[in-house]
């Protein structure tokens, strides 16, 4: 009889913990969805990705001028700072991933300013932008998996 009660108690505890964890996930997912909406994350990050691609195109053109680099890099720097200002998110891991992405893109924009006459500096700026893009992809995947996108 005691073994039966212990089994029933264990089953009840398991069911209760599953129910509670589902509630917590729903609340977290709802908060994350609200944050994504209030931060205009989809639109702002699409613009940030577009700006990063523009910077990569200019960095990849050996004939681009310092003025062209400064223009695309200034825009990218501004957009990455603006995106960073939307943090933190309600999810710590998402915040960490987006922080890594925005920081790398900002570092790439800053490296880009000095890259006009140096293939090595152009390569370093490109590397920053690729790292930022990778972290950004991870953050988007996480947001999608959490049902926030």
Image: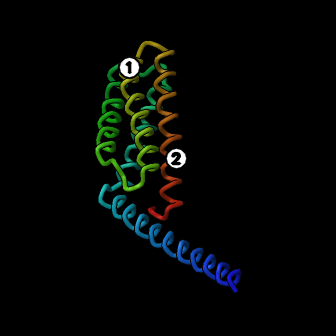
Image position, residue 13 (x, y; %): 57, 75
Residue positioned 60% across, 79% down in the render = 9
Image position, residue 15 (x, y; %): 58, 77
Q: Secondary structure at mark 1?
A: loop
Which of the two discs, 2 and 1, labels the residue nearer the N terminus?
1
Label 1 belongs to which residue?
65
Q: Nearer the viewer, residue 6 or 47?
A: 6
Instruction: Relative to 136, say whether 9 is above or below.
Output: below
Image position, residue 126 (x, y; %): 49, 27
Q: Nearer the viewer, residue 11 or 89?
A: 11
Q: Is residue 62 left or right of residue 27?
A: right
Label 2 belongs to which residue?
137
Query: Which quadrant of the rendered structure holds the C terminus?
Result: bottom left
Instruction: Relative to 32, say whether 62 is above or below.
Output: above
Q: Residues within 10 Å of mark 2 (few under 14, many from 20)?
A: some
Image position, residue 80 (x, y; %): 34, 39
Furthest residue toward top: 117
Q: Quadrant of residue 110?
A: top left
Residue positioned 34% across, 64% down in the render = 34
Q: Nearer the viewer, residue 118 or 143?
A: 143
Q: Quadrant of residue 117?
A: top left
Checking the image for residue 145, the label placed there is none
């Amino acid at each position: 009889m005691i073994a039966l009660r212990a089994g029933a108690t264990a089953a009840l505890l398991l069911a209760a913990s599953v129910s509670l964890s589902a509630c917590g996930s729903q609340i977290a997912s709802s908060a994350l969805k609200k944050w994504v909406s209030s931060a205009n994350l989809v639109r702002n990050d699409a613009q940030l990705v577009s700006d990063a691609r523009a910077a990569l195109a200019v960095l990849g053109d050996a004939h681009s001028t310092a003025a062209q680099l400064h223009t695309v890099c200034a825009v990218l720097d501004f957009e990455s700072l603006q995106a960073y200002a939307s943090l933190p998110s309600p999810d710590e891991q998402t915040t960490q991933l987006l922080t890594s992405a925005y920081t790398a893109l900002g570092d790439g924009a800053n490296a880009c300013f000095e890259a006009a006459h140096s293939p090595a500096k152009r390569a370093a700026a490109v590397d920053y932008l690729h790292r930022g893009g990778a972290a950004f992809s991870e953050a988007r995947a996480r947001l999608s998996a959490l049902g926030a996108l």
